[in-house]
């Protein structure tokens, strides 16, 4: 079988640029409406593959896919692990606004871990009021 380019196929079947654009828009809308599990499947990934990329268990991926509510950082890591990039867009009648605080969910996760680690690293100090002595807790 002879391999043909996509452009040759479109020309052979007289598919106009408008029809191509409409088809592409429908495909994007369909993909945009997928649930996380469907999105993962559309990307031809298994839960196990995604789990390995995320550094979590397959059961945790299954749980993420069934949640009705996710943190944006969690969703961002899921999307990144499946090869994409999460963008949050606010749609208003007078225009769209890209919210860029989500630019790097991995960085947000690292900052959160650093905060947790720094809290654990600091020993708490108790002071005896009467004597003024300090003791580590």
Image (tube, grey):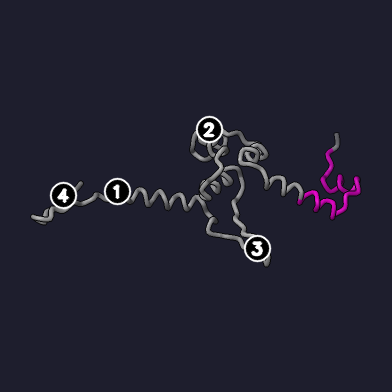
Crowding at dot 1, Cα within 10 Å, few <14 / some 14-19 / many 20+, comes out as: few
- Closer to the chain start, of discs 2 and 1, is 2
Dot 2 corresponds to which residue? 58
Q: Are marks 2 and 3 in contact (CB under 8 Å)?
A: no
- Classified by dominant secondary structure, the portion drawn in magenta counts as helix
Under circle 4, the secondary element is strand
Which residue corresponds to mark 1? 121
Most foreground residue, 5 or 82: 82
Q: CA distance from mark 2 to mark 4?
A: 45 Å
Task: Judge left or right: residue 102 versus residue 32.
Answer: left
Q: CA distance from mark 2 to mark 1?
A: 31 Å
Q: Secondary structure at mark 3?
A: strand
Q: Which residue is mark 4?
A: 135
Q: Residues within 10 Å of mark 3 (few under 14, many from 20)?
A: few
Check residue 1 for magenta coloring.
no
Q: Which sits earlier in the primary sequence, circle 4 or circle 3?
A: 3
Q: Are marks 1 and 4 in contact (CB under 8 Å)?
A: no
How many C-alpha atoms fall within 10 Å of the one at disc 2: few (<14), some, or many (≥20)? some
Q: Quadrant of the N terminus?
A: top right
Could you tell which of marks 1 and 4 lies nearer the N-terminus? 1
Which mark is drawn over residue 92?
3
Q: Quadrant of residue 83?
A: top right
Residue drawn at (67%, 39%) of the image: 42
From which residue to which does the magenta span run?
3-25
- Expressed as whole percent of the image width and height from the top left, the position of residue 60 reads 51, 35
């Amino acid at each position: 079988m002879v391999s043909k380019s996509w452009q040759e196929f479109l020309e052979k079947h007289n598919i106009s640029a408008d029809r191509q654009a409409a088809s592409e828009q429908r495909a994007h809308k369909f993909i945009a409406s997928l649930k996380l599990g469907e999105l993962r499947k559309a990307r031809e990934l298994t839960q196990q593959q995604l789990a390995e990329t995320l550094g979590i268990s397959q059961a945790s991926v299954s749980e993420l896919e069934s949640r009705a509510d996710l943190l944006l950082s969690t969703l961002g890591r899921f999307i990144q692990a499946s090869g994409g990039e999460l963008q949050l867009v606010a749609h208003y009648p007078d225009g769209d606004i890209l919210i860029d605080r989500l630019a790097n969910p991995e960085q947000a996760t690292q900052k959160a871990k650093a905060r947790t680690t720094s809290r654990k690293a600091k020993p708490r100090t108790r002071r005896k009021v009467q004597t003024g002595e300090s003791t580590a807790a």
